[in-house]
Image: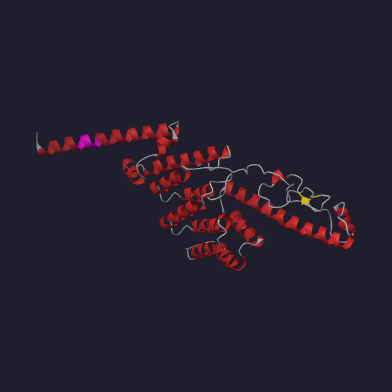
Amino acid sequence: MKASRRVTVIAGVLVAGCMLASVALVHHLDQVRTGASLEEVLYIPSPKALKRMSLGYDGLLADVYWTRAVQYFGTKHRVGAKRYDLLAPLLEITTYLDPQLVVAYEYGSNFLAPAPPNGAGMPRRAIDLQEYGIRNNPNEWRLYYELGFIYYMDLKDYAGATEAFARGTRVPNAHPFLRLLAGQMAEHAGDLQTARMMWTATYQTSTETAIRANAAAHLRALQVDEDVTRLEALVASYREQTGHFPASFSELEAAGILRGTPVDPLGHPYKLMPNGRVEVRSPDDFPFIQKGAPPGYVPPEAPKVLPTD
């Protein structure tokens, strides 16, 4: 056999082998999508080994792992799980395979950081995920925002939040909100107005329906907290003047302390209790409120919409 023909045959065999391996990989991915156990999907020796095994299908395999991460979180979340042991590894493998999959960083941090039942209660792993995303996507200003959000909301680390927002302001085309948040955080970290600004920024800058809905729910809860604080202060003032609690808000109106019947963000009148407490009529409508719920009330699992892409 001539040398040139031998090279052609060897090359043909190698190409055929690669094609068969690719077909096998795609077949395996199809099995993963349709019923393989999560442990089978996850426990590969290392992300680097998995990347080598992908034969160039890094993006496809990343999509599979991202799908599995969403499914895993969704399944656990629906049953009110307290542990999400495989969530961080799934997200880390996903982003190693495709470091530019920005949605995995944005949603992944929302899955990891909040305390159960709304998340996995792993804010430090969420920070690690965001920092990895920033290293690979340094001009994505949303990642700096998400990082600052975790520091502020989940860790109450206002210095860390200030630094994250400040880093984001140096990114080309960064949203002006980042500069406002960095300044607000440094001056008034932890107050109600700062929290409102945070959630307003989330609502106004996000294009994801689920994230906007979550932000809107938090903004309604903040309004309830503010309303209840103000109304209970008025009730206390009335008691100091009269020696007794008002029987209704009408008595506060008659005394010139209040104008009109106060309503919650959904338009329902607040309830004035005999002991001076102010409550919402339907606390299930406000899963994130800190004030205004009846004593002993246990809020339902806050709804979380998962990405469909």
**Relative image position of residue 92 (x, y in whole percent):** 43, 47
91 horizontally vs 176: left or right: left
What residue is drawn where x is 52% and y is 52%?
123
Q: Quadrant of residue 193?
A: bottom right
Q: Nearer the viewer, residue 83 or 154?
A: 83
Q: Quadrant of residue 250?
A: bottom right
What residue is drawn where x is 69% and y is 47%?
286
Q: How many numbered marks have been drawn onto this rendered protein structure?
A: 0
Q: Is residue 22 above or below residue 273?
A: above
Q: Nearer the viewer, residue 172 or 54?
A: 54
What residue is drawn where x is 53% and y is 37%?
75
**Relative image position of residue 89 (x, y in whole percent):** 43, 45
Q: Is residue 65 above or below residue 217?
A: above
Q: Nearer the viewer, residue 66 or 100?
A: 66
The stretch of residues the image draws in magenta is: 11-15
Q: Is residue 201 above or below residue 4?
A: below
Q: Residue furthest left?
A: 2
**Relative image position of residue 272 (x, y in whole percent):** 82, 51
Colour convention of the picture: secondary structure
Is 279 part of what is drawn in magenta? no
- Of helix, strand and loop, which mostly describes the magenta segment? helix
**Relative image position of residue 304 (x, y in whole percent):** 59, 43
What residue is drawn where x is 43% and y is 41%?
65
